[in-house]
Image (cartoon, rainbow, N blue to C red):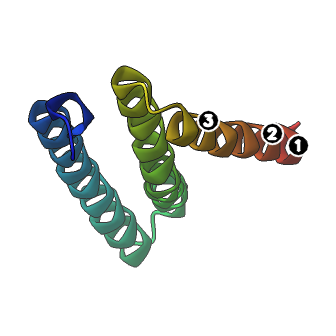
Amino acid sequence: MTTPEALPDATARDANARLARILVAVVLALLVAGLAGSAAGAAGFATPTLGAACGVLLLMPILNVAAEFVDEVRRRDWAFALAAAAVLLLIGYTAIDRLG
């Protein structure tokens, strides 16, 4: 039987969905602006704009895992919280290893 505290919080789920929609809109705007800049021959504008769009696309799943980690800790589901923490640590390690 599922207890009420084990169910996902509707407000947190709604906030995550809202953030995802906002980030998708930001990515779309950046892609359109970058492609328009590229078509206009403004490589100095298009390249960082398209790079920012790619950065936001990479950030979206990381934010999702972080939100799940917070939700699992709040619900005291330690197995899934540990799994989410391991994913975040792996992403952090990879980013530091590749960029550092």
Pointer 2 residue: 93
The kind of secondary structure element at disc 1 is: helix
Pointer 3 residue: 82
The image shows residue 10, relative to residue 60, as above or below, that is above
Identify which residue is drawn at 49% across, 47% down.
59
- Give left or right: position of 89 versus 15: right
- Give me the C-alpha separation between circle 3 and circle 2: 16 Å
The answer to whether mark 1 and mark 3 are in CB contact below 8 A is: no
Closer to us: 1 or 28: 1
The image shows residue 94, relative to residue 32, as above or below, that is above
- Give me the C-alpha separation between circle 1 and circle 3: 22 Å
- Give me the C-alpha separation between circle 1 and circle 2: 6 Å
Q: Quadrant of the C terminus?
A: top right
Marks 1 and 3, the one that precedes in the sequence: 3
The image shows residue 44, relative to residue 88, as above or below, that is below
Identify which residue is drawn at 43% across, 72% down.
38
The kind of secondary structure element at disc 2 is: helix
Q: Residues within 10 Å of mark 1 (few under 14, many from 20)?
A: few
The kind of secondary structure element at disc 3 is: helix
| Dot 1 amino acid type | Asp
Closer to us: 81 or 13: 81
**Residue 25 pos. (x, y %):** 20, 55
Q: Residues within 10 Å of mark 3 (few under 14, many from 20)?
A: some
**Residue 19 pos. (x, y %):** 23, 41
| Quadrant of res 96 | top right
Pointer 1 residue: 97
Q: Nearer the viewer, mark 3 or mark 2?
A: 3
| Dot 3 amino acid type | Leu
- Give left or right: position of 50 versus 13: right
